[in-house]
Image: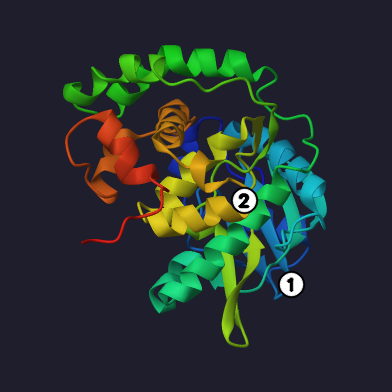
């Protein structure tokens, strides 16, 4: 029997118990001074106060190359700290990445303590960080052909949402909506693709909150910059138009560019996203004014300046 359990499919990996991984982790590190983090889709361990070890089981081994390549590309180039790669390796088919540990708490944890002014400040900082990220030369990442990727995602969009359990009233709208949105032909950039509150760290510095970390680059890709804002709108702004507007203005958009066409492009990228699950989003995000994708684009991705009442 090996130090790490057999897990050759996602289903086998999901069935593993935490204690089954401990001998392999100890072998990788050469000691037992580690503690598993409770969060995360992949096993991640704190190694003392300064290091983090992440494991990639065989079904997800390619994500090791993606994450380590992206982290090396962005190291020292963003206005927010990112984990530095210490070393990578493989043991019995499992990949592992040892990296530096970031300080702070997740934006999810801090969010209830942030004032409106704090949130506006964080939005501005995050917008600047994403603008810098998209200026970093992208390493060799998937997909090799962005236009071909979008074509495949468009062709499978309805089937993917149907498998996720989306109601027919929404499924019927998807082809026409996607056909009506012009995504253009933008130059590909380095994308994080899952910028959400759980993957952003903040800490108190004097009288303000500052970004202290951006992590979890395992789903990084090379593609259109606006693909990034699907996750940003869904999982960071979460339907808060003021937060999204502040982030996008800091990123570099002009006020006039944040129109309904922009919102529709963001929803189109949401439907085309690798991990899209519209049924779930409808449960956790603000309800649209009516059950249409056009109204949904406004509810989730509106970043236009609000008009005072009266």
The residue located at (18%, 41%) in the rendering is 289
How far apart, in angstroms, are the residues tagged by discs 1 and 2?
31 Å
Q: Residue at x 66, y 56 (%)?
A: 128
* Secondary structure found at label 1: loop
Q: Is residue 288 left or right of residue 126?
A: left
Few, some or many residues within 10 Å of mark 1 (<14, 14–19, 20+):
few
Display coloring: rainbow
Asked whether 45 or 108 is in front, the reply is: 108
Q: Position of residue 239 (x, y in %)?
A: 35, 51
How many numbered dots are placed on residues in this image?
2
Q: Which mark is residue 251?
A: 2
Does residue 253 lie above or below 173 as drawn? below
The residue to which callout 1 is attached is: 50
Q: Measured along the vertical axis of the image, is residue 38 above or below residue 73?
A: below
Residue 78 image point, x, y percent = 75, 56
Give the vertical position of 146 relative to 251 (above or below): above
């Amino acid at each position: 029997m090996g130090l790490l359990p057999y897990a050759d499919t996602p289903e086998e990996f999901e069935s593993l118990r935490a204690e089954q991984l401990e001998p392999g982790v100890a072998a990788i590190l050469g000691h037992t001074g580690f503690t598993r983090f409770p969060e995360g889709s992949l096993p991640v361990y704190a190694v003392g106060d300064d290091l983090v070890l992440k494991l990639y089981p065989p079904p997800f081994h390619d994500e090791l190359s993606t994450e380590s390549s992206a982290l090396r590309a962005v190291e020292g180039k963003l206005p927010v700290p990112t984990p530095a790669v210490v070393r990578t390796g493989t043991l019995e088919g499992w990949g592992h990445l040892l990296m530096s540990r970031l300080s702070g708490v997740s934006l999810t944890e801090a969010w209830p303590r942030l004032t409106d002014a704090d949130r506006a400040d964080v939005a501005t900082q995050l917008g600047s960080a994403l603008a810098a990220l998209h200026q970093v030369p992208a390493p060799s990442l998937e997909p090799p052909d962005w236009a071909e990727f979008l074509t495949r995602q468009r062709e499978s969009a309805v089937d993917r949402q149907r498998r996720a359990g989306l109601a027919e009233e929404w499924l019927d709208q998807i082809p026409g909506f996607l056909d009506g949105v012009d995504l253009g032909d933008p130059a590909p950039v380095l994308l994080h693709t899952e910028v959400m509150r759980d993957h952003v760290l903040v800490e108190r510095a004097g009288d303000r909150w500052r970004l202290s970390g951006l992590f979890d680059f395992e789903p990084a890709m090379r593609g259109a910059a606006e693909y990034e804002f699907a996750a940003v709108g869904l999982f960071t702004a979460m339907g808060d138009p003021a937060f999204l507007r502040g982030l996008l203005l800091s990123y570099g958009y002009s006020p006039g560019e944040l129109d309904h066409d922009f919102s529709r492009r963001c929803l189109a990228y949401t439907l085309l996203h690798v991990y899209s699950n519209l049924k779930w989003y409808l449960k956790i995000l603000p309800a649209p004014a009516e059950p249409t994708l056009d109204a949904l684009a406004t509810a989730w991705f509106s970043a236009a300046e609000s008009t005072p009442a009266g």
